[in-house]
Image: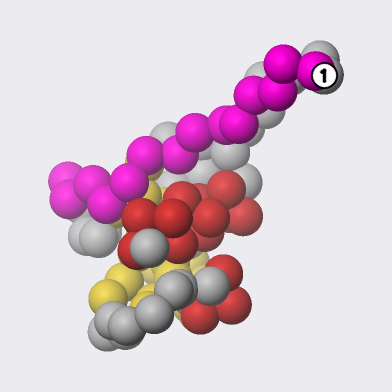
Amino acid sequence: MSGTVKLSDLTYMGKVEGRHAWSYDDSWYYWTEKSNVVTSDLQGSLVVCRLTLTLSRDTQNTIRPFTKTDAKKAIVSTLN
């Protein structure tokens, strides 16, 4: 891997065994809806990163479920 990884560099591979999957540079990343971790294995034991919500002091914050976009952003942030 060289340079900065962008969101568009990850390829969404669809669902694999019920988990959303992305690939980048011969590596695969998996995320299950309602989960707060991305893993590099289908069993869910090799955690790559944790998802977090950004809170703002100036606005009303609401708790919401994580999305595929949140997972993808967390992967890119970890790779960078």
Relative side of 30 to 76, left or right: left
Residue at 45% from the left image edge and 73% from the top image edge = 5
Question: x%, y% of residue 10?
Answer: 49, 75
Residue at 27% from the left image edge and 52% from the top image edge = 48
Report the quarter where the N terminus lies.
Answer: bottom left
Any magenta on residue 47? yes
Quadrant in the rendering for residue 18: bottom left
Q: Is residue 75 visible?
A: no
Circle 1 Cα neighbour tier, 10 Å, few/some/many (<14 / 14–19 / ≥20)? few
Residue 21 position (above or below residue 25): above
Residue 44 position (above or below residue 9): above
Task: Give the magenta-colored segment's residue range.
Answer: 44-58
Which structural element holds mark 1?
loop
Question: x%, y% of residue 78?
Answer: 36, 55
* Farthest right residue in view: 59
Q: Which three-letter amino acid code belongs to the residue tagged 1?
A: Thr
Question: x%, y% of residue 45?
Answer: 17, 46
Q: Is residue 41 visible?
A: yes
Residue at 58% from the left image edge and 38% from the top image edge = 66
Rendered image coloring scheme? secondary structure
Identify the residue under disc 1: 59
Quadrant in the rendering for residue 25: bottom left
Report the quarter where the C terminus lies.
Answer: bottom left
Foreground residue among 30 and 2? 2
Most common secondary structure along the magenta stretch: loop
Foreground residue among 19 and 28? 28
* Farthest left residue in view: 45
Residue at 35% from the left image edge and 63% from the top image edge = 79
Residue 21 position (above or below residue 34): below
